[in-house]
């Protein structure tokens, strides 16, 4: 039986979850994997704080060197979160030949080149399944199960907090602010929800997903990002009437050598598998030239789902003869400047002769073809009605160009929401 010394950097919810899972599954792991993990030291900020796991006091330390410089620690598990000092500690551990297992999407996406270079130089292992979609084994699938494919697109619901908020807004017709406040009361959204609701968390994850899917580094700065704070119940309602469900989507596509990577609210048809992914669940829908379409679904957050992926990575790190790094080119990726999809456009339009013709003419002049037009019956105090248009697939630039030429006297723009997967 191999005994492997491990150390933790950080011990919040996820670290405690990993500690508990390792204790609970010791026998199972020994029997099935032939390895025993000995937790030697755990770096924490406050060694006196109460924790959600029964950790011997002597294991806790507030000195990073106790983990990073202990020759008996072969694998370092990083749970600190944030870019620094987590990234520097991971680089130090890798440079010292220790394998690293991390759930830290922010550090990994922001410092990908430095962290991977440190692993490449020393030959130590770098494992990060838990950084994208928690328990869902999407990175392993991209790295080890779909190698024979040219991945064409990856489309995901990769942030549970926003999916929970949008699911409840859809079911209850409630406002964004009310559902967010409720989710915060229930502990489902952070007191400062910015990282989730503004799409930063999803953008880090998409940078990692796209990098692995297309074998080119897609820096997080190349990911277009828009959050859900401006989503209005009326848009969700109008979309439903057209058979569409609103999600915060992460979309990555590769076409003609150009990559597009974007996080924003988007409609998907009700019949699309992603439409049924509700509440805090995550899913990633992959299209490969050989495998066709497939969807990976499960829990993307929480201490035990995340611990499930971390312990799996730990076992891989302990049992690998040679640590493989993903085949990712160092060349900068070429980012698409414009992209094509269908667009849902909601406007408040004067209910008068010629208005619809004027709106449609602007779209026609920009080469945008319209698939569906709906005018809602009720008018506001100024006699304006809600006008909903669904375009055929069109360039984003052309749609924006047409909209910029529609005067407010004709129609005031309410919202433009991209539609994927129709
Ligand atoms: N806050 C994330 C989510 C989980 O809501 O999905 C960690 O990435």
Image (cartoon, rainbow, N blue to C red):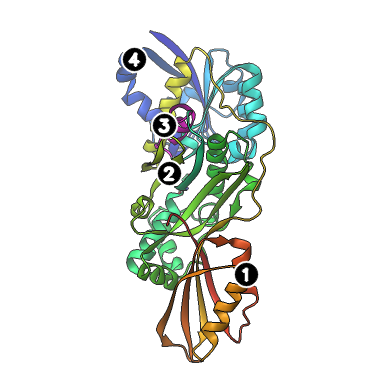
Instruction: Identify the mark nearer the N-term, 4 or 1.
Output: 4
Q: Nearer the viewer, mark 3 or mark 4?
A: 3
Q: CA distance from mark 4 to mark 1?
A: 65 Å
Query: Is 136 within the magenta?
Result: yes
Q: How many marks?
A: 4
Q: Residue at x 63, y 29 (%)?
A: 115
* Distance Cα–Cα, label 3 vs label 2: 16 Å
Q: Which residue is mark 3?
A: 309
The answer to whether residue 9 is left or right of residue 234 is right
Q: Judging from the image, what secondary structure is the residue with disc 2 in? A: strand
Between the C-alphas of marks 1 and 2, the distance is 33 Å
Span shown in magenta: 134-147
First-in-chain label (1 vs 2): 2
Secondary element type, mark 3: helix
Q: Nearer the viewer, mark 2 or mark 4?
A: 2
Q: Which residue is mark 1?
A: 366
In the rendered image, residue 17, in percent from the top left (x then y), is placed at: 39, 34
Residue located beneath label 4 in the image? 30
Q: Secondary structure at mark 1?
A: loop
Pointer 2 residue: 284
Secondary structure type for disc 4: helix
Q: Which numbered disc flags the more N-terminal residue, 2 or 4?
A: 4
Residues under numbered marks 3 and 2 in contact, where contact means CB atoms less than 8 Å apart: no
Disc 1 packing (10 Å; few <14; some 14–19; many ≥20): some
In this rendered view, identify the residue nearer to me: 297 or 90. 297
Please identify the quarter of the rendering in which residue 55 is found: top left
């Amino acid at each position: 039986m191999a005994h492997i010394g491990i150390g933790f950097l950080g011990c919040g919810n996820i670290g405690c979850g990993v500690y508990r899972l390792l204790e609970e599954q010791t026998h199972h792991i020994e029997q099935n994997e032939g390895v025993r993990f000995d937790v030697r030291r755990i770096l924490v900020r406050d060694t006196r704080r109460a924790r959600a796991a029964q950790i011997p006091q002597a294991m806790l330390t507030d000195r990073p060197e106790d983990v990073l410089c202990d020759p008996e620690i072969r694998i370092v598990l990083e749970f600190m979160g944030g870019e620094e000092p987590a990234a520097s500690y991971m680089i130090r551990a890798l440079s010292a030949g220790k394998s690293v297992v991390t759930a830290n999407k922010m550090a990994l996406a922001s410092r990908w080149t430095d962290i991977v270079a440190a692993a490449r130089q020393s030959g130590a292992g770098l494992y990060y399944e838990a950084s994208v979609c928690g328990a869902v084994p999407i990175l392993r699938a991209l790295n080890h199960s779909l190698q024979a494919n040219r991945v064409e697109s990856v489309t995901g619901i990769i942030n549970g907090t926003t999916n929970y908020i949008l699911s409840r807004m859809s079911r209850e017709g409630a406002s964004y602010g009310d559902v967010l406040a409720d989710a915060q009361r229930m502990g489902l959204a952070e007191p400062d929800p910015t990282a989730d609701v503004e799409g930063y968390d999803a953008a880090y994850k998409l940078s990692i997903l796209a990098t692995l899917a297309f074998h080119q580094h897609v820096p997080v700065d190349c990911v277009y990002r828009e959050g859900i704070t401006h989503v209005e119940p009326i848009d969700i309602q109008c979309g439903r009437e057209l058979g569409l469900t609103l999600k915060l989507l992460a979309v990555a596509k590769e076409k003609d050598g150009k990559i597009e990577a974007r996080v924003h609210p988007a409609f998907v048809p009700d019949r699309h598998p992603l439409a049924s992914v509700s509440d805090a669940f995550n899913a990633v829908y992959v299209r490969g030239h050989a495998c066709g379409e497939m969807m990976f679904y499960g829990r993307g957050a929480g201490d035990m789902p995340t611990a499930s992926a971390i312990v799996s990575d730990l076992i891989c790190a302990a049992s690998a003869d040679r640590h493989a790094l993903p085949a990712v080119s160092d060349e900068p990726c070429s980012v698409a400047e414009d992209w094509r999809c269908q667009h849902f456009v909601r406007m408040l339009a004067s209910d008068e002769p010629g208005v619809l013709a004027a709106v449609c003419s602007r779209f026609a002049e920009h080469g945008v073809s319209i698939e569906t037009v709906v005018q809602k019956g009720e008018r506001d105090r100024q006699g304006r009605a809600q006008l909903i248009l669904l375009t055929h697939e069109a360039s984003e630039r052309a749609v924006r160009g047409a909209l910029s030429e529609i005067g407010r006297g004709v129609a005031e723009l309410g919202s433009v929401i991209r539609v994927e997967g129709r």
